[in-house]
Image: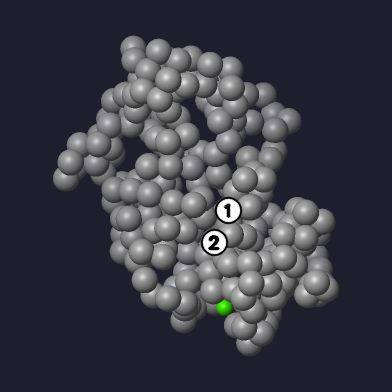
Amino acid sequence: MAALEKHDTDPKATVLVVEDDSAIRRGVVDRLIAEGLEAYEACDGQAALEAINRLSPDLVVLDLGLPALSGYEVLRRIQAAGGPPVILLSGLGSEADRVLGLEMGADDYVTKPFSGRELVVRARNLIRRSRASNNDDSEGELYTAMISGAEFEVDFARRSVKLDDIEIVLTPREFDLLACFVNHPRQVLTKPQLLNLVWDAQVGWVGESTVTEHVRRLRTKLKVADGSGSCIDTLWGVGYRFEPDS
Ligand code: CA
């Protein structure tokens, strides 16, 4: 499906906007371009997946309510391919839909109707992290520990994580969250603290359920091969604590 159109360019960050509602799509694209970003658009999921393969965008803005291939299915395929970070556009105003999207690996979401400014701020944050994670030519500052009996290694410069020498694929946001825990070992971090440190957000702007979901995803990814153990403890009503073995 040739549902793709190239817009004003600048050798800057590339964003693919996936939305079937042409007015919303155009509005988002125009705003991104006005902010100096390079924006492409796709009006359905199939076109989106083709565009991601071809363009390797720095970020995808993905509407959940798409015809044919659903936004969730597009998200699932992007995640399976280790694709770029994703901001969801949710028109449903439903916490359950947002949580499901985050569970499936989205990095952030905005709810329609949203302000262009809010979307641009979130887009820029994710692009900055994504680019940092792709910048792997600098010398690595390494953190190593044992977690649940497995060798755990975080390379901050490469933004890579290994468990028993096997690379764990994290989204940029998940890496930032993990880095935050690793930089504060055995220290209780509250959800508002994590929102502030990892999401650059004032409390209330990004919900605390976002933290909950990202922690859950991080735990799932950091489970050792035998499925045991979590290196991130929950202190109910207080927050989370990163606990290496020793
Ligand atoms: Ca839609």
Seen at 72% across and 72% down, the residue is: 42
Q: Around disc 2, counting alpha carbons within 10 Å, would you say few (fewer than 14), some (14 to 19), or many (20 or more)?
A: many
Which residue is nearer to you in this view: 92 or 178? 92
Residue contact at pointers 1 and 2, CB within 8 angstroms? yes
Seen at 16% across and 45% down, the residue is: 237
The image position of residue 205, as x and y in percent, is 36, 65
* Residue 173 against residue 18 in the figure, above or below: above
What residue would you read off at disc 1? Answer: 76
Q: Around disc 1, counting alpha carbons within 10 Å, would you say few (fewer than 14), some (14 to 19), or many (20 or more)?
A: some
* Residue 80 against residue 224 in the figure, above or below: below
Label 2, ligand 1: CB separation under 8 Å: no
Alpha carbon distance from label 1 to label 2: 6 Å
Amino acid at pointer 2? Tyr
Secondary structure under tag 1 reads: helix
Label 1, ligand 1: CB separation under 8 Å: no
Which residue is nearer to you in this view: 210 or 31? 210
Amino acid at pointer 1? Arg
What residue would you read off at disc 2? Answer: 72
Quarter of the figure with residue 235: top left
Secondary structure under tag 2 reads: helix
Task: Give the residue at the far bottom of this rendering.
Answer: 23
Q: Which quarter of the rendering shows the C terminus?
A: top left
